[in-house]
Image: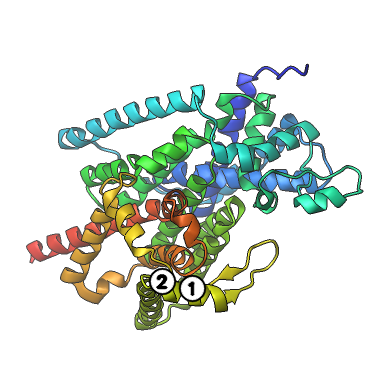
Amino acid sequence: MTMIPELDATGLMLALALPWLAGVVAVRALLGPLRFTLLLGHGFMVGQLLIILLLLAWDALGLRLAFAPLAWVLAALTALLVLAWRRNTPSPGPEFTVGWRDALWLLPLLAFLAERGLSLAGEVTMRPLFAWDAWMNWAPRAVVWFHEGALATFVMPEQWLAATTDPAPYTLGNPRANVYPPGVPLLLLWPMLGGGTYDHNLLYLPWLLLPAAAGLALWGHLRQLSLPRAVCALAVFALLSQPLANTHTALPGYADLWLAVAFGLGGMALAEWHASGQWRWGVLAALLALCCAFFKVPGLAYAAILLAAAGLLLWRPPARWVGWFLGSALALTTVGLLLGLHPDAAQFGADHLTIPLPGALPTLQLAPAPLLPLLWDSFFITANWHLFWLLLFTCLLAGLWLRGYKTLHNIALVVFVCGLGVLLAVFGLTHYFRQAANGVTLDRALLYVVPLGVYVAFAQLATLWHANRAAEAH
């Protein structure tokens, strides 16, 4: 009987700390002096990207996957980035002063974070349930790669049956999981290598650190907008109290939360570029787009949205062109969703309209479906999102009422609308509605845009707050 190796706690802690440190140094070298919350938030995700790229490059060179040499390479890369960091001209960072009024808001936030963090940490460390998606799609590849010491090939079942090569490829019970992007299995493989084992609850600690990094980044970006700390505290609460996001932390192993945070941070980085004109934020957004592509197949669409938005900031077309394009796309989607309420429209589309997709992706059957009732239930009735969608729509409507068309001059809002539009089109106008009807797949997909949506809502509040203060000053 094969014994499961004991966990090397020191190696695991190094596996968790080294990428985060490398990511923080990389972001600092790229962007120069920043708020420490931005460095920690974006640095965590960039560090995970560095690990993915390092493991892929190491395997491409034909080297055996082992923690010690990989860790030394990562440490050397961090040292080189520190040299690039020191070449940047230092400038005084923002002062961190907290008055008693701030404490009235910050102390409840810290109490909430402590309670939520401890409860989720208990779920992750004890893991009473092994998440189905992790067991079915992501963890098996990491376990195989750990044992093989290499990124063994996974193929479709029919290819596996016909294979005659040595070493033989592997296959998974879910056929399509064999062609899923490698990002999440690699993020699980790395702590396995550091901990020296493939089966321990603490290997899933990155899923606990991920929402913490998202909250830090959200705080930093909203403080960049000069929002009061009390409002920033409410924003962090609005993000980290999302029930479905908490579920994806408590059941570690899913890829959805990784894509949601990467897409959200990418949209926030583009908003910083739009506001400051510093193109280096665009580079960071491109790195986060690469993260999206590595995490899930839908991440390819979200990576394309981030890159297209970066292209808009480079091109800077008239705002009315962007408005007309988005308005037309949303109008067509709305018409399709309304048609979906009529059953004959759905049957006609399923019989006559298809779009073939490349590779192993399935052919899309265009069929308007009754998605609107499901959206209403998800947004306003079920308990997956608390009051997030009501908050978001209220903030946007208030912005439109008070500021008119200027409210739409917001690249983060454009990115959010495009991300949500993709989901509405896929689940409301194609055969994927069948997967949305059970409520699980739809809500998991909506999670992709929620972190960015929280930022958009509170950024709108920031704009209205500044406009009100300017009006009072005059």
Which label was assigned to residue 167?
Answer: none
Q: Are marks 2 and 1 in contact (CB under 8 Å)?
A: yes
Colour mode? rainbow
* Up/down of 310 relative to 146, above or below: below
Classify the position of the N terminus by image quarter: top right
Q: Quadrant of residue 141?
A: top right
In percent of width and height, residue 396 lies at 25, 64
Q: Quadrant of residue 299?
A: bottom right
Classify the position of the C terminus by image quarter: bottom left
Which label was assigned to residue 343?
Answer: 2
**Of 275 and 230, the residue lying toward us:** 230
In percent of width and height, residue 259 lies at 51, 51
Q: What residue would you read off at disc 1?
A: 347
The Cα–Cα distance between marks 2 and 1, rounded to whole angstroms, is: 7 Å
* Up/down of 125 relative to 47, above or below: above
In this rendering, does residue 458 appear at all? no
In screen coordinates, is 186 left or right of 262? right
